[in-house]
């Protein structure tokens, strides 16, 4: 067992002990007079099973744990500086029953929110001449993780909404399928996304979770290719003789001891007078993209934390957690994803389709 796995089990055991003590204070539980060994065995097994299967129950347990911690910290402070406030707060707390109720409301909202996809618009200006005078409409989806919040019906509706926007180009930015997607759904995913209609085609790059599937990202890419979707696996593609689209293999290949081509290698032969758009599932190595002359990079991966306060934690491993940022000449877009991973629950963020209205900066070029 790896050191990381050992630490994970230790952390889970500590959480189970803490949660077990807190839950036993709740009257509806303590009054049942369950033998202590039965109670602790059931509590431990419940937390372990919920976390391993990544069910909606796991999302509920996360918020129960967080709210218990918040209450304990606030109660400790109030007990010292405002004893009367502590007494009132403790009365409302009802020995933890309030935490269970609030967490249930949060989980119900999170489940509802996970399946309601919004369209997020960004207006992007590139300091180069574009394909045409009219702005170009690019739609991007990532992180559908089909089989969790996104099932067959939701995926079909997603395609309908994409086609209704009449896009010029559509990008699938990774983690469309993951290791938990039933293999019986793969063909449906290929067929359904193959119905996307756009002027310049649909393009796919793999995400980290597609690397973990039994079939592997190469077979998934081939499944998309057979439906008219162009996979870009460390490849550079000239679209309509007017702009370059570069798709990178996911960086987890490198973390697992594999390799992916350098961006400088992929940029060989690129005419820098044309716009250069980069698809890279994880929002990292942006300075390299800027140095190599990329104009626009589109990513997913972060889910914008998926569960609050994860919105802040994602900044620990990613250069941009979510949204749109201008980094000099480089424009960066990170999507929260169209689905969810692990369980169908999203709090503090939205499932989304990203729509980019991209145009050239003709005025700046004229001045130069």
Image: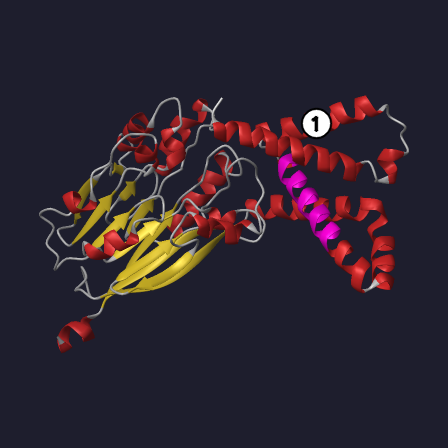
Give the farthest residue toward the bottom.
367
Above/below status of 272 relative to 157: below
What residue is drawn where x is 79% and y is 64%? 81
Q: Nearer the viewer, residue 30 or 207?
A: 30
Q: Which residues are magenta?
A: 57-73
Q: Quadrant of residue 324?
A: bottom left
Tell me the chief SS of the magenta region.
helix
Please state the horizontal and vertical placement of residue 356, each as a whole percent of the image. 34, 58
Q: Residues within 10 Å of mark 1 (few under 14, many from 20)?
A: some
> Is residue 315 one of those drawn in magenta?
no
Q: Is residue 135 visible?
A: no
Q: Nearer the viewer, residue 115 or 91?
A: 91
Q: Nearer the viewer, residue 341 or 253?
A: 253
Horizontally, residue 176 falls left or right of residue 168, namely right
What element does badge 1 sit on?
A: helix
Q: Quadrant of residue 122?
A: bottom left
Horizontally, residue 31 falls left or right of residue 22, namely right
Please state the horizontal and vertical placement of residue 82, each as a whole percent of the image. 82, 64
What residue is drawn where x is 66% and y is 34%? 14
Q: Which residue is mark 1?
A: 44
Horizontally, residue 49 falls left or right of residue 118, namely right
């Amino acid at each position: 067992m790896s050191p990381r796995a050992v630490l994970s089990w230790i952390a889970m055991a500590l959480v189970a002990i803490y949660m077990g003590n807190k839950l036993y204070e709740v009257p509806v539980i303590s009054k049942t007079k369950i033998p202590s060994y039965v109670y602790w065995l059931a509590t431990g097994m419940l937390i372990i099973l919920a976390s391993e299967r990544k069910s909606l129950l796991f999302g509920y347990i996360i918020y129960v744990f967080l709210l218990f911690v918040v209450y304990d910290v606030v109660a400790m402070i109030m007990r010292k500086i405002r004893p009367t406030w502590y007494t009132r707060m403790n009365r409302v707390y009802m020995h933890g029953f309030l935490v269970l109720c609030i967490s249930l409301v949060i989980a119900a909202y999170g489940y509802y929110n996970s399946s309601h996809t919004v369209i997020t618009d960004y207006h992007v200006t590139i300091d180069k001449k574009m394909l045409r005078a009219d702005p170009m409409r690019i739609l991007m989806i990532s992180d559908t993780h089909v089989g969790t919040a996104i099932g067959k019906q939701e995926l079909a509706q997603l395609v309908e909404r994409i086609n209704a926007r009449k896009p010029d180009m559509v990008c699938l930015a990774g983690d469309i399928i993951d290791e938990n997607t039933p293999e019986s759904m793969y063909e449906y995913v290929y067929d359904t996304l193959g119905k996307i209609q756009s002027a310049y085609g649909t393009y796919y790059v793999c995400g980290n979770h597609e690397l973990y599937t039994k079939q592997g990202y190469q077979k998934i890419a081939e499944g998309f290719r057979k439906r008219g979707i162009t996979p870009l696996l460390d490849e550079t593609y000239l679209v309509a003789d007017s702009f370059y689209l570069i798709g990178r293999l996911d960086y987890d290949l490198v973390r697992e001891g594999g390799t992916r081509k350098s961006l400088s290698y992929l940029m060989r032969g690129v005419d820098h007078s044309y716009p250069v758009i980069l698809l890279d599932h994880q929002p990292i190595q942006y300075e390299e993209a800027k140095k190599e002359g990329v104009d626009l990079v589109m990513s997913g991966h972060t889910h914008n934390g998926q569960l609050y306060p994860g919105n802040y934690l994602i900044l620990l491993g990613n250069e941009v957690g979510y949204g749109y940022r201008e980094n000099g000449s480089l424009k960066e877009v990170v999507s929260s994803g169209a689905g969810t991973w692990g369980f169908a629950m999203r709090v503090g963020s939205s499932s989304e389709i990203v729509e980019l209205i991209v145009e050239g900066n003709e005025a700046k070029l004229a001045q130069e």
